[in-house]
């Protein structure tokens, strides 16, 4: 049985959109869900997030809205973005990285436009998730450590952005690689030979100063 890990951060609307595509993956695939801190990945690789570049920020939000409309996915951006994702990420960890709970959190943020930094909205979300969404457990040192461990695991696997699927040592970054991942699942050898093999070791021709 093929195993895969899906790395995500609730801060990413692309992760929300890909969440709605995960049901396209074959039933025989064993997938684990790993909430990670996107900011930690950016810091490690020395990147800026799309929301940190004004023109790219506007483009990203418009593009996500357009994609959602095309795919008939409910989509309402939260009142402010980017927001601090630590509480919902820790909530997902505290709930055992359960797929249904992760979906509920995503839908609250982007399906309903919920504000996880608003106390009233936060209480509304945790009440919906039931007694297991315990504030003490969310804030517990072991929950915080588990989230850090997930982020460290992602870096060690070479993950540089979210969402990313990792399987068989291969990375599939972004919403638009869902079909590529499905092709890889059906024929992994295709991606290890020929031109795929050549470009994997392509030398760098020039470096930016």
Image: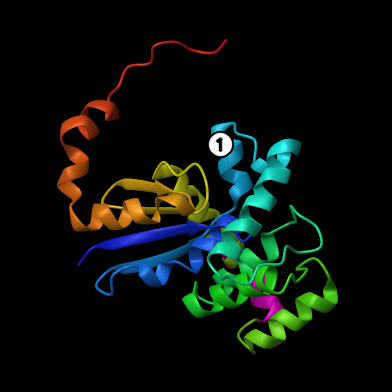
Percent x, y of residue 104: 59, 78
Percent x, y of residue 16: 57, 63
User: In which quadrant will I find the C terminus?
Assistant: top right
Percent x, y of residue 20: 49, 69
* Magenta residues, dominant SS class: helix
Q: Is residue 49 visible?
A: yes
In the image, the segment drawn in magenta is 134-142
Q: Residue at x 84, y 78 (%)?
A: 120
Instruction: Look at the image and say whether residue 136 sits in the magenta stretch.
Output: yes
Give the labeled residue for mark 1. Answer: 44
Q: How is the image coloured?
A: rainbow
Q: Residue at x 24, y 57 (%)?
A: 185
Please state if 151 lies on the left or on the right of 189 as rendered. right
Say how many tags the image has: 1
Instruction: Look at the image and say whether residue 166 sits in the magenta stretch.
Output: no
Percent x, y of residue 76: 71, 67
Q: Residue furthest front?
A: 70
User: In which quadrant will I find the N terminus?
Assistant: bottom left
Q: Residue at x 55, y 74 (%)?
A: 103
Is 93 placed above or below 123 here?
A: above
Per the image, label 1 sits on a secondary structure element best described as helix
Q: Residue at x 50, y 54 (%)?
A: 163
Q: Nearer the viewer, residue 197 or 38?
A: 197
Badge 1: how crowded within 10 Å, few (<14), some, or many (20+)? few
Q: Quadrant of residue 134?
A: bottom right
Q: Nearer the viewer, residue 133 or 52?
A: 52
Please state if 37 lies on the left or on the right of 195 as rendered. right
Q: Nearer the viewer, residue 8 or 25?
A: 25
């Amino acid at each position: 049985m093929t195993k895969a890990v899906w790395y995500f951060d609730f801060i990413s609307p692309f992760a929300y959109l890909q969440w709605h595509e995960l049901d396209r993956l074959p039933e025989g695939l064993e997938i684990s869900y790993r909430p990670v801190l996107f900011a930690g990945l950016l810091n490690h690789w020395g990147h800026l997030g799309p929301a940190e570049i004004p023109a790219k920020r506007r483009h990203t939000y418009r593009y996500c809205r357009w994609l959602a409309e095309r795919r008939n996915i409910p989509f309402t951006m939260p009142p402010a973005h980017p927001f601090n994702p630590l509480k919902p990420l820790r909530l997902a960890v505290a709930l055992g990285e359960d797929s249904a709970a992760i979906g509920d959190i995503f839908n609250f943020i982007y399906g309903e436009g919920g504000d996880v930094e608003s106390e009233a909205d936060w209480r509304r979300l945790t009440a919906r998730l039931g007694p297991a969404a315990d504030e003490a457990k969310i804030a517990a040192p072991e929950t915080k450590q588990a989230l850090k461990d997930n982020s460290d695991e992602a870096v060690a696997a070479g993950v540089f952005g979210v969402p990313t699927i990792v399987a068989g040592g291969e990375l599939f970054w972004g919403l638009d690689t869902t079909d590529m991942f499905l092709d890889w699942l059906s024929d992994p050898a295709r991606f290890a030979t020929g031109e795929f093999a050549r470009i994997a070791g392509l030398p760098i021709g020039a470096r930016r100063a």
